[in-house]
Image (tube, grey):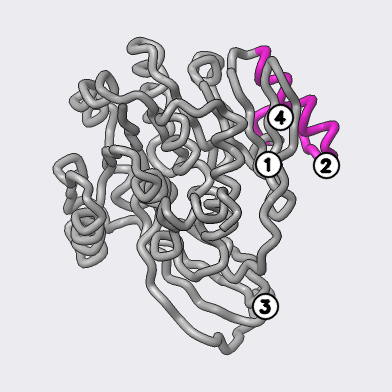
Amino acid sequence: MSVLVVGSFVTDLVALCERAPEAGETLHGKEFNIYLGGKGANQAVAAKRMGADVTMVGCVGNDIFGDDFVKTFTEEGFDTQYIKRTSNARTGCSLVTLETNGQNRICMTPGANLEFTTDDLYALESLVEKANIVVTQCEMRPEIVDELAKLCTKHNKKFVLNPAPARTFKGETLAACYVISPNETELGVIVGRTLNTDEEFVSAAKELLTKGVKNVIVTLGSRGSLLVNADTTQIVPAMKVKAVDTVGAGDSFTGSLAAFLDEGKDVLSAMKLSTIVGGLQVQKHGAIPSMPYRAEVDKVANGK
């Protein structure tokens, strides 16, 4: 059993401040940090720290940030041979304004992530064949998501799609999804309308079920997450914690969810454990550094 993550590598340049500046305004920040992140990298590490056998596929630049990713993923126990290096673009980078209340605003430049092509993907088709769970997001070329969905259908793999940043999808891509995990805004983009209430979220999720999606998990921030499938409609409440940094919170949820599904857990049980992962992760700074380990999650799950 194993998890394959096809996704992004992004270095986060994070400025901590009391509030985000208005247009044309300059503020003094409290501190500045550099963290390794990117939705793909975050999800891969989250799954790995839950004990899954994880392979990460993507592209970084031939620069210091790319070197940092290869070094860190080696230390995390990954086989880094599937991390492509390129001189055509710099490693992806995000400028993050992090407010002291834990909220963030992010501008991401994909850089080298766009250098990973469908040719690269098909050259690694054997990795899809070997995997049990396949995970991706939308920080790479749009066609990567669609072609990966086709490969998952071809090889009968459980495809977990985190549709962020928000975009629309082909019908065959949605039909390939075992799990799709949008937040409220992303769900609205997918179905083509603004959504504001739980009733509207449920209605939109059921619309995706008619397109072939097996499980829709809508992340609701501090409220938790909503599961909609053919058997149930249920909200899993979030942990009650003081969030200091929400960067990577959704990624910790999605990555760990893939790991728990790989273990054979049902979707609802996996969600409940992933909710603990997310609750632990937001109590520390930095996406990858704050990803919890399995022992921490089990301790909370067992009430210790």
Mark 2 Cα shell of 10 Å, populated few (<14), some (14-19), many (≥20): few
Q: Would you say 53 lies left or right of 264 here?
A: left
Mark 3 Cα shell of 10 Å, populated few (<14), some (14-19), many (≥20): some
Q: Of the residues shown, which amino acid type is indicated by label 4?
A: Gly
Q: Are marks 2 and 3 in contact (CB under 8 Å)?
A: no
Marks 2, 4: nearer the viewer: 2
C-alpha span from label 1 to label 4: 21 Å
**Quarter in which the C terminus is drawn:** bottom right
Q: Would you say 22 lies left or right of 105 here?
A: right
Q: Earlier in the sequence, mark 4 or mark 3?
A: 3
Q: Of the residues shown, which amino acid type is indicated by label 3?
A: Arg
Residue 75: x %, y % from top left: 21, 59
C-alpha span from label 4 to label 3: 31 Å
Which residue is label 2 attached to?
196
Q: Main secondary structure of the magenta part?
A: helix
Secondary structure of the residue carrying tag 3 is: loop
Residue for point 21% across, 27% down: 124
Q: Are marks 1 and 3 in contact (CB under 8 Å)?
A: no
C-alpha span from label 1 to label 3: 27 Å
- Please tell me whether residue 160 is drawn above or below residue 243 in the rendered image: above
The boundaries of the magenta stretch are 189-210
- Please tell me whether residue 191 is drawn above or below residue 252 in the rendered image: above
Which residue is label 3 attached to?
19
C-alpha span from label 2 to label 4: 13 Å
Per the image, is 192 magenta? yes
- Please tell me whether residue 296 is drawn above or below residue 84 in the rendered image: below
Which residue is label 1 attached to?
225
